[in-house]
Image: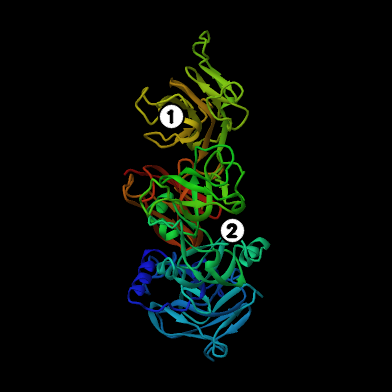
Amino acid sequence: MRLATLFSFFLALAFLAPPEAHAQTYAFEAEDATLSDSDPDDADPGAEVRDASTDTNVSGTFTGTGFVALQKGVITVDISSVPAGEYDLSVNYASPFGLKYEYVDVDGVRYGDSAECTESFTFADTAVWTPLALADATTGTVTVDGTTGTLVITACYGYTYFDSVTLTAPGSGGMTIAEARAAGVDAEVTVSGTVTRAAGAFSYFQDETGGLAIRQTSGAFFDDIASGTITPGTVIEVTGTISQFPSDPRGGILQLNGPDLTSYTVVSQGDAPDAQEVTLQELIDNGEQYESELVQVSGLTTASTGTFAAGTSYEVTDVSATLTDGLRIPNADDTAIDGTDIPSGAFTATGIVGQFTPSSNPDPAAGYQVLVIASGDVEADTPPVGGFTFEAEDGAVSDPLPDDTEPGAEVRDATTDTNVPADYTGTGFVALQKGALTIDISGLEPGEYNLSVRYAAPFGDTKYEYVDVDGVRYGDSAECTESFAFPEATAWTNLALTDASSGTVTVDGSTGTLVITACYGYTYYDSVTLTPLVAPGTETPAASGGIALGRAAPNPFGTSARIPFSLEQAETVRLTVYDVLGREVAVLANGPMASGDHEAVLSGASLRSGVYIVRLTAGDASVVTRVTLQK
């Protein structure tokens, strides 16, 4: 889906082109498959993941992060998620070294269109990425029955390059969901897709082009949801008339409502599609593209406390933006999230994109939010490496003016101080006005750490406090001569303390303490967290275990940064970017890669200015570097 695809649909409608038959499609990237080499002692790999930087024998555009060059090996694709049935099989391939023949087995059965190699498929000579339908000479289609859960391509007479493999179940007609959405209100449509969420009166389903909502408060479809016949992963085909809720010219959710759903068929049962990873800024900018689709937003925080309430919207923030009504808990019968705890720290929300249009908002493209429905749709984030959290009340407090009637530093709880909510962690918190809070960090291994606190500042305006780690002072403000700024916060709030010069803090064991000293209080502290840039016990240089991570360029950057890395041998790698709170904000590489030099690009478009940690992992080896975004 996305803009280019939607444009093609709109263009087709403009020329009154009839809708094409719609089919359920399952696409697999070859580079994500399992590769094996039939002759591992040969200097030339039998099956290897490559990309445009490591192989220039083919032209055109491949999908995903790379492709597989198959000479003497085997590509095994996991198709266990594909429902049983008959499918058309196609590949995107190139054969730059002449005509080739390769074996193809689906769930243990071999198919082919040629007697060459004894039942194989023919791959014509081409140095350009080319889509090719693989029609079996006898059946035409292939059968998926779950016997092995695999689709296996074995080299017979290679070299052949594979980009992707697609299985398509012929549908009974209709249109894509994007075409149905483009047809608009009062259009009669027949569409099919996979259910992503279903609870109470509402269900949502999507295909590769878009999503739609179905609302049924009674009847057979409603009963099938209640009984579990229709559940996430169910493939359905529906016919009905599209309406919009609310019926407001400023916009709303397109749906099949009540009697507007004239018929439906349960086609098969499989797995729900993976949620698309988005940011709040993407929902603000392009919410319509994601309407009624399953998405996931990570690194969210909220000032709200207590438990989630049905029929309520919550303000949430991620690294890209703040969305006033960005998280929605549907009505009690339509969600399992009502009554569950609101996370006190960063969390990930998985759900359906809906649209909330308050009367004060004239913008039809605004108001998009994530509806959390299923149990587990809200999960607390786990730091990327082992973080160490210290409860403030377990530290030592000192008061420079002990005879003052108002203590300078004091441990309190909900029974002695009602200025802040009672959802603090541990047994209490520290109210710091004129004193110091000293935390013992002598148990930490030496190294670079991200520093964050959970704090509140309920008495107006910004406060400033000194922070010393192992005798070294850090800060982001010249106020109070090198101190950290703590904005007004009436609820417990997670705050990354990013030093203006280094970004991080250094633990070296000199004093074994972290000291917070009041400069311009009153500030309340719940906990302090130190998160190492690399997990304890691993190496910290930029090269380790056969992998190396170069310096980002430019650094600092404003639009994008190039991040070079190299592998001594082919590896399965993950190149991930985190903010200073340990929240994952981008994945730049994830999967098998060839040996040699590589380069990834980090875009700053959806990120806020600040320091980010780039981490390259392969096997047990891990290396990190820092990059700074300045907009």
Q: Is mark 1 on a helix, strand or loop?
A: loop
- Kind of residue at badge 1: Glu
Residue 130, x across and y down, in percent: 41, 78
Q: In which quarter of the image is residue 473?
A: top left
Q: Are marks 2 and 1 in contact (CB under 8 Å)?
A: no
Q: Nearer the viewer, residue 334 or 432?
A: 334
Residue 458 visible in the displayed image: yes
In the picture, the disc for residue 201 is: 2
Which of the two discs, 2 and 1, sits closer to the camera?
A: 2
**Disc 2 or 1, which lies upstream in sequence?**
2
> Disc 1 marks which residue?
488
Residue 59 visible in the displayed image: no
Q: In which quarter of the image is residue 612?
A: top left
- Kind of residue at badge 2: Ala
As drawn, 295 above or below 97:
above
Q: Is mark 2 on a helix, strand or loop?
A: loop
